[in-house]
């Protein structure tokens, strides 16, 4: 398999002395759907900036499809499409002109550019808006315009920096479908996100970055398998006695108030076992909810370095 | 990979630039034409008739080349500085920076965009001047060459200004405090023969003085300066400014962090 992105020991110190990347190494295979996950300020956008040449790296090397971005500028840029985190097109230009101009920057002949422009504006539901000035678009449309613009030269690698931040749920779903489709057609996709659900739904492989360092780099499946405990909140009809103990090895409870407890179930224990135990203890459970997203818990525990 | 990709990219930038200043023609084309029109009426016509001759010509004839040049200089500069800075401000400059467009193509595209506006306004002003005086050009090649080279110089200068600019104030400081005085003291309105020796010497340090006078030489056939010397200065400025621009682009000054 070819490697789409190979980052070795990437370091970036900004002019103000802030060390945003501290020796990041990362390999992403061709065809992958990859999530770069991390809290705000972790360095995700900085990595993307280096890949797209908007950020000058301080150390390390970056290859795209086996070619060094410093020495093979033309080829590596042709292979790469970037959807940035913040809107970065001119507010005064028309939707179609923005995409056509980008095609021109890639040296595309006019006939081909016109064809691709229509194709991607249609795919992203913007064709009706083609003659409108970009500032009149809604937030979601602006984001889709940036995706159309990034795809007009049909790059083998598409990088999206928090593509669904601030986008409503319905639109988020349709964007997921769209991204899955182009990934199925062979485009390698890397996205950064802090929505764990998004990573869980879409991505095969994942890296977690925090404070400029990669703290986890694995497949989504393995990461989820690491999850061996779940936390629930239970509401009970009967009053919980003081020092209530469930008396099971792999479950612990903590009383929150007279009618609710926190329950942590781990290992092989099934939820059924827990409930038969509640029956025995004559505790009637009214309701139950997951305390946090499972992945979120894992993520937080990783960040804390547990 | 596309053959001819650099030329297509260049053309794309130029077309985008021209589209921009023609879209906002009320801000880019009308005000300079109006201002120069007023100069024609007030200085050329009303005041000029009292002045009589300047440098051996009717005052109106004398200032027309200077005013054409003034509009070319101001508009070339202003187009590049405001367009490029506005792309920086809106971050739309990133569109071209992430694309495989070589730095010199970016630079040439913006410079030609600046020239298009500078020469466009120059042409409007020239056409307007025909209402006030008969314009006959004595030396067409020199006239055209000097106006083209001057437009290149100030487009390049505007580009450097835009690279360093961080705010809208930064793009008006140089035009207001450097460009305008140099133009007004560059012999647009008077012949340096009128000046005492010290100020004559100071004028000789002003590059715009050479440009204006060489252009006037092309049109009227008479000038305060040596034409060969003027062209050397113009070419030297172009080479130096071009190299500065390329150096700054390569370093990513004001563009890449
Ligand atoms: N241009 C800049 N100058 C100085 N510091 C910056 C700059 N851009 C980002 N940073 C800092 O670098 C760190 C990483 O930022 P970023 O890569 O944007 O994080 P993320 O995208 O993961 O939220 C943050 O602490 C941020 O404040
Ligand atoms: Mg970010």
Image: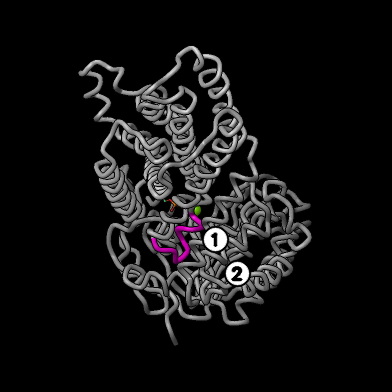
Between A139 and B64, the residue placed more toward the observer is B64
Q: Which residue is drawn at 37% across and 44% down?
A: B153
Mark 1 Cα shell of 10 Å, populated few (<14), some (14-19), many (≥20): many
Q: Is residue B232 visible?
A: yes
- Residue B158 horizontal/vertical position (percent): 41, 41
On the image, the x and y values in percent for residue A124 come to 71, 65
Q: Left or right of A18: which side holds B80?
A: right
> Which labelled disc corresponds to residue B12?
1
- Percent x, y of residue B111: 44, 50
The residue that label 2 is drawn on is A152
Q: Residue, x 49% and y 54% (percent of image)?
A: B94
Residue A232 located left or right of residue A170: left
Number of residues whose C-alpha sits closer than 10 Å to that of mark 2, classed few (under 14), some (14–19) or many (20 or more): many
Residue at 78%, 52% in the rendered image = A237
Give the Cα separation between the discs numbered 1 and 2. 15 Å
Image x and y of residue A60, in percent: 29, 65
For disc 1, the chain is B
Q: Is mark 1 on a helix, strand or loop?
A: helix
Magenta residues (range): B94-102
Relative to B241, residue A143 above or below = below
Please give the name of the residue rendered at 41% of the width and 35% of the height, measured from the top-left corner.
B220
Quadrant of the rendered structure where residue B24 is? top right
Mark 2 residue element? loop
């Amino acid at each position: 398999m070819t490697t789409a992105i190979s980052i070795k020991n990437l370091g970036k110190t900004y002019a103000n002395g802030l060390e945003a990347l501290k020796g990041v190494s990362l390999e992403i295979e061709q065809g992958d759907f990859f999530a770069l996950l991390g809290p705000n300020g972790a360095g995700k956008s900085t990595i993307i900036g280096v890949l797209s040449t908007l950020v000058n790296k301080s150390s390390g090397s970056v290859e795209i499809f086996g070619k060094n971005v410093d020495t093979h500028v033309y080829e590596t840029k042709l292979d790469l499409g970037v959807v940035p985190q913040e809107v970065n097109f001119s507010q005064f230009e028309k939707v179609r002109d923005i995409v056509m101009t980008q095609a021109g920057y890639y040296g595309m002949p006019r006939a081909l550019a016109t064809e691709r422009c229509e194709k991607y504006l249609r795919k992203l539901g913007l064709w009706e808006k083609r003659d409108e000035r970009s500032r009149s678009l809604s937030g979601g449309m602006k984001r889709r315009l940036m995706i159309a613009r990034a795809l007009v030269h049909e790059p083998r690698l598409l990088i999206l920096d928090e593509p669904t931040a601030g986008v409503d749920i319905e639109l988020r779903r349709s964007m997921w479908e769209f991204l899955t489709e182009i990934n199925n057609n062979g485009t390698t996709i890397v996205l950064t996100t802090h929505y764990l659900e998004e990573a869980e739904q879409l991505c095969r492989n994942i890296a977690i970055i925090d404070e400029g360092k990669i703290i986890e780099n694995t497949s989504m499946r393995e990461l989820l398998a690491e999850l061996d405990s779940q936390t629930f909140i239970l509401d009970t009809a009967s009053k919980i006695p003081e020092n209530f103990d469930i008396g099971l090895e792999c479950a612990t409870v903590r009383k929150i108030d007279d009618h609710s407890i926190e329950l942590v179930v781990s290992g092989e224990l099934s939820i059924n076992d827990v409930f038969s135990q509640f029956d025995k203890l004559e505790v009637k459970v009214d309701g139950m909810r997951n305390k946090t997203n499972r992945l979120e818990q894992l993520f937080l525990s990783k960040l804390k370095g547990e | 990979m596309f053959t001819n990709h650099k030329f297509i990219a260049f053309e794309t930038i130029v077309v985008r630039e021209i589209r921009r200043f023609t879209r906002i023609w009320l801000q880019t084309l009308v005000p300079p034409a109006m201002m120069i029109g007023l100069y024609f009426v007030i200085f050329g016509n009303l005041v000029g008739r009292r002045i009589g001759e300047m440098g051996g010509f009717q005052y109106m004839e004398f200032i027309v080349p200077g005013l054409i040049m003034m509009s070319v200089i101001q508009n070339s500069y202003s187009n590049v500085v405001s367009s490029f800075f506005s792309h920086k401000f809106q971050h739309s400059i990133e569109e071209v920076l992430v694309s495989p467009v070589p730095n010199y193509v970016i630079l040439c595209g913006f410079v030609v965009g600046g020239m298009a506006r500078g020469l466009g306004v120059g042409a409007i002003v020239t056409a307007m001047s025909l209402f006030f005086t008969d314009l006959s050009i004595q030396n067409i090649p020199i006239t055209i060459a000097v106006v083209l080279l001057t437009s290149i110089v100030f487009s390049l200068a505007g580009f450097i200004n835009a690279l360093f600019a961080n705010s809208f104030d930064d793009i008006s400081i140089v035009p207001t405090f450097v460009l305008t005085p140099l133009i007004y003291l560059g012999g647009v309105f008077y012949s340096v023969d009128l000046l005492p020796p010290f100020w004559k010497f100071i004028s000789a340090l002003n590059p715009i003085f050479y440009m204006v006078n060489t252009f006037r030489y092309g049109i009227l056939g008479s000038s305060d300066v040596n034409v060969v010397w003027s062209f050397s200065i113009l070419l030297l400025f172009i080479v130096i400014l071009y190299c500065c621009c390329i150096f700054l682009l390569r370093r990513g000054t004001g563009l890449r962090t």
